[in-house]
Every structure is written in structure tokens, then in C-alpha cells.
Amino acid sequence: MILAVFLIGLTAVLVVVNAEYDQDDRAQLEAERFTALVRHLQGESIIVGYPLGVRLEAVDNQYRFYALQDQWQLLTRDEVLRPRAIPEGVIMTLSVAAKKNKDDKVDEARSDGEDDDSDQKQSSSVSTENMIVVEPTGLTTQFVANFTGDSTTYTITVDTDQKLVLSDNKGNRI
């Protein structure tokens, strides 16, 4: 009887330990979540009729959603578009193509706190630097977001038809 209880307990512990995600699984899950949230952001921007954005906050290791109404404002009351922390062990990088003064410029941020501006205090107005902006027409800023675990990187891009593409570092679409 005691042996049976011991074996059942040991089996339960092994199942729980094996059920935990490794870093690559967490990176894939977070990449899929980010893709779904940006798709939601695209639809929401069309519905509300004003620009929405998502910005990587490297210092806080999270990304946040904003709405442009006179100025960029953090969305705080939306259950879906709430600030999201990047899981421990997952590194997110974001490269956003932005046009400023007719010159193409790419802004980059990293979720592991290695952003060049990490020592500067954030001003009261939100910069569109490192922000993916979705216009009310559905037009989305071109960007590349990478979510890296132990050995796999998951990449999200916007194709020419404004559809999001999620793939791994082997080129497999997910």
C-alpha cells in the first residue's frame, strides 16, 4: 500500500516537472501571444478610428499599448491590451522602420535592459521610438520582432499585404 502511494506521488511529481515550459517553449508562446495582440490591435484601430500602438519598454522588460488622442496615452483599462511582461529567460528585440524627415530610420530596443536609452528617464510625453503604430486604415508600421529562448528565435514581420507572419529561425511558418 505504501509502495503504491509512493509510486503515484513520484509519477505526479514527474508529470508536473515535465509539464513546465522550457525557454524555447516560452519564447514561442510569447511570440504567438504578441502576434495575436498586434492582430487585435489592427482590428481595434479600425473600429475606434484612431491610431493605436505597441511599444517595447526595455527598462521594464515589457511591452505596452497606447492610443493616440491628442497625444499618446497608455491603455490601462483594456483587459486585452494591457501591459505585458516578457517572461524570464525570453529576450524580445524589436526593430521598427520609421520615416522621419523623408529619411528611413530603424529604431531598436531589447527586452533585457540593454537598450541605448535605458539610463534616460522617460518623459511625460511618449515617444514613438520603438513603437509599432497601427493606423485606422489598418496600415501597420513595418517591424521585426524577435522572441529568443535557449536555442530558437521566433520572428514576427509584416508582409506586403499587411498580414503578420510568425516563423522560427529555421524558416518554418507557425
Image (cartoon, rainbow, N blue to C red):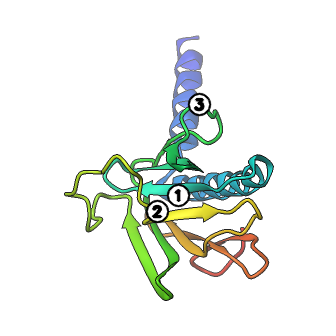
Identify residue for label 2. Answer: 128
Q: Quadrant of residue 11?
A: top right
Element carrying mark 2 = loop
Report helix, strand or loop for mark 1: helix
**Residue type marked 1:** Ala
| Depth check, front residue: 154 or 21 | 154
Residue at the extreme front: 70
Residue holding disc 3 = 77
Looking at the picture, tell me which residue is in the foreground, 12 or 35.
35
Whichever of callouts 1 and 3 sits on the residue coming sooner in the sequence is 1
Residue at (19, 57) in percent of width and height: 119
| Classed neighbour count for the residue bearing mark 2: other residues with Cα under 10 Å, few (<14), some (14–19), many (≥20) | some
Q: Are marks 2 and 1 in contact (CB under 8 Å)?
A: no
Q: Residue at x 55, y 48 (%)?
A: 65
Percent of width and height locating residue 30:
57, 53
Q: Quadrant of residue 155?
A: bottom right
Establish if 57 lies above or below 168: above
Q: Secondary structure at mark 3?
A: loop
Under mark 3, the amino acid is Arg
